[in-house]
Image (cartoon, grey):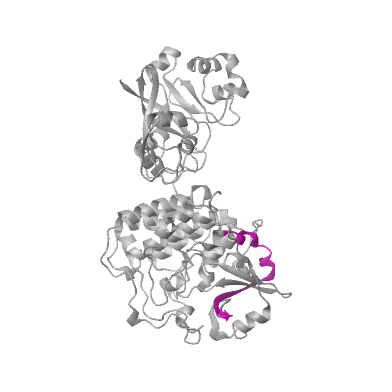
Amino acid sequence: MAAAASQIMLRTNSYYSSLYNLSYHLGLNRFKIAEANGFSAQTEFLPRDQPLLLPIDCKCNNGFFHADLTKTTIKGESLYGIAESLEGLTTCKAIRDKNPGVSLSGLVDKVRLLIPLRCSCPVTATEVTPQAKLLLSYPVSQGDTISSLAIAFNTTSEAIISANNRSLEEFKPESLIPLTSLLIPLNGEPLLGSLAKPSEPNLHFPESSIPITNPHKKKSRMWKIGIYIALSGIAVGAIIAVAATFLVIQMKKKKKQKQNLSKEADLELQQLSLSVRTASEKKVSFEGSQDALDGQIIGSVSSVKAVLEIYTIEELRKATEDFNPSNQIEGNVYHGCLSGKNMAIRRTRTENISKVELKFFNDATHQHPNIIRLLGTCVTEGSNSFLVFEYAKNGSLKDWLHGGLAMKNQFIASCYCFLTWKQRLRISLDVAVALQYMHQGMISPSVDIFAYGIVLLEILSGQTPISRPDKKGGGNVWLSEKIKVILQSDSPDELREWMDSAIGENYSFDAAVTLANLARACTDEDPSLRPSAGEIVEKLSRLMEESPESTEHMLICESSCKPLVNSSSANL
């Protein structure tokens, strides 16, 4: 049974939207894919619905042509889902026949399945259509007709009909059913029309400085400035990041409009960023939290519904001692205690409350261990109202990386706080898992992915999202711009110098390069090139698996730390 080189076409989708997915889960060579499609093998994330040519080895067995791919399963997959992800290039029955004894659904992780794909060899193409040099396996999509495909691939309707051993009557427009496949005879290398190919991130900037603005993209820059302002002015404690992202993705979208830095207050809806919730009163430990999530993400959502509390302004005044400065965590966020329950109370504009989809909090999503819970609201007749969150007693990721009022006020330990490399990896994964959990069943909102990329850069560098001008002058320096310049450098020392000095040499440089490139992809100016939360989780999970077990002590030493909460609230 001889094998010959052939090609199939597959559109990138939620299952296969990166070269890593295609190479790891389908056993395809990323360099051959890149060569066949005319882009760099270093291109990681691909735009959705991008047509890709996949080189395969086509075999003939008892008069039938097929190509066998080796699919590495993901926990919870089904044979039907695998067939659907390949858009009709195979069928559930064909996969089942190739893998007898395998369950139709509920597959376990990392099972290797043989996936037969429909194909045809070049010699067969010549026999069917003398001028044809190649038969391309094409997955039919909604709206395809024989005539439209003939035009798209520079062939004829008769040639397509002949290649598929069908009659004209069988190829009426309504007979082209999505999730089926056709053989398209080609006279040369296939042209995939005018659809854009994956583009490389634009990393070229003047060597003398990091650009601050782009006059041709002022509107886009203003939006990005808003994100940075949001990320740099973040509140601590219970309401930071994941909680805020939780809200932002549910907020009604407003039409973009030109704005300047003097209107920072108008961006309050985005002034919350990503963080993690820690679980110990006197220690910080990020070990083991992932295992607890395995069943929750795939499992069914609990039927227990949460009810948001409606607080009065009098209750919040009592909880915060009339918003006493001693209870201020940071910015508009205060620590409070009501009926023995610690809480974080954030002041926000009354108009913003109506923009939060409160019904979203009536399901179990907020019970995820990496997402801060919204406890209730307080709507006043004035310009300011309040959101009440559970209290994250160990503070935020921002505090642990940069310090802050929460530490200075001893809301968390004012000792020397340090996160090891393994802890930083775990935090990055846990926050990504929380995003994936929130984004199930939907395309990951690009603003969330951008914000996550900024946090990832903070975790790597220990720097704030924006560096203010120094005494020598100059403009603001953005982390997302700086990393592009660093990654285009030929010297690895630039990345080493950029990494958080607190880590020292106790980290994997290869893993750091991978994370830096991932962060760069997350902050790409083109939202379509940003990875999904699922893809981020997949890559970080692989890094965690490859990370050697360390003998370093993963917990902060108790003896060197003060209590993580004020003595006034320790007994609350």
Q: Residue furthest right?
A: 381
Q: Is residue 482 visible?
A: no
**Residue at 49% across, 84% down:** 571
Q: Quadrant of the rendered structure where residue 541 is?
A: bottom left
Q: Is residue 485 left or right of residue 405?
A: left
- The picture places residue 66, in percent across and down from the top left corner, at 39, 24
Quadrant for the N terminus, please. top left
Q: Is residue 416 left or right of residue 341?
A: left
| Viewer-nearest residue: 139 or 76 | 76
| Viewer-nearest residue: 65 or 141 | 65
- The picture places residue 375, in percent across and down from the top left corner, at 59, 70
- The picture places residue 226, in percent across and down from the top left corner, at 57, 63
Q: Is residue 313 magenta?
A: no
User: With respect to residue 231, does 104 lie above or below?
Assistant: above
**Residue at 42% across, 68% down:** 463
User: With respect to residue 39, does 9 lie above or below?
Assistant: above
User: With respect to residue 34, does 203 lie above or below?
Assistant: below
Span highlighted in magenta in the image: 335-363
- The picture places residue 169, in percent across and down from the top left corner, at 60, 15
Query: How many callouts does the rendering have?
Result: 0
Q: Is residue 177 visible?
A: yes
Q: Is residue 351 magenta?
A: yes
